[in-house]
Structures are given as C-alpha cells and as structure tokens.
Amino acid sequence: SRASASAGDRDQYYRSCVAECSSAERCAMWQPGSSLRMLGWSCEHDCRYRCMWQATDARTAAGGRTLQYHGKWPFVRVFGVQEPVSAFFSAVNGLGLG
C-alpha cells in the first residue's frame, strides 16, 4: 500500500520517471540484454531500476540524502543480478557450503 511504501517509492521524481519509462509505447520498444532476459526482468522492473538511480543521482547532486526504494537501499545490478553479493551468499548457503 502507499502508506507502507518506502520514501523513495513516494518521491514524485521517481514516480514520474517510472510512469513515463514504463508506458505501453516505451515498453513495446524495450529490448533487454540477454542477461536481463534470462533472469526474467520486465520492462517495468528495468524502469524501476533505472529511475531509482536517476532519482538517487539527482537527489545527491542537489545535496539530498539517499532514499530507500521498495524497502531497500539503491543497489548495483551486475549482469542482471540484483545485489550480487547477497545473491552469491544465498546460492552458497543453498548448496550447503555456508
């Protein structure tokens, strides 16, 4: 619900960016890389990621603080994997190696 959304999710810059980026017209032209396709990223998920960084960059350039988005701090995506260090340790733990 909107009341439980993170501060970044409520940020008007972020919301406007996601709305524009994930429009039907733009998503119809979206061409994800192979890693995003393989990992099941959608146009909307990619828009949220890109807009999170645009909003974060704009906010920090203006001297503002970094906000959380979807309950998490901004993360770097590596080959389509969100939070690669966490994903690595989860995989190791899942294999019983941790």
Image (tube, rainbow, N blue to C red):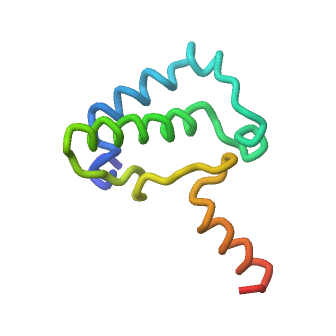
Residue 70, image x and y in percent?
42, 52
Q: Is residue 8 above or below residue 58?
A: below
- Quadrant holding the C terminus: bottom right
Q: Residue 61: which quarter of the image?
A: top left
Which x, y percent locates residue 3?
27, 51
Q: Who's the residue at 78% across and 36% down the image?
A: 34
| Image position of 68 (left or right of 47) | left
Taking the view exactly as shown, the residue that stands out farthest to the top is 25
In front: 24, or 84? 84
Left/right placement of residue 70 relative to residue 13 reads right
Question: What number of labels is visible?
Answer: 0
Residue in view at x 65 percent, y 65 percent: 87
For image coordinates 34% across by 44% down, the residue present is: 9
- Quarter occupied by residue 41: top right
Q: Is residue 95 left or right of residue 62?
A: right
Instruction: Decide: is 55 above or below 69.
Output: above
Res. 37 image quadrant: top right
Please provide percent x and percent y for residue 30. Answer: 65, 22
Image point 21% across, 38% down: which residue?
62
User: Does 29 appear above or below 2?
Assistant: above
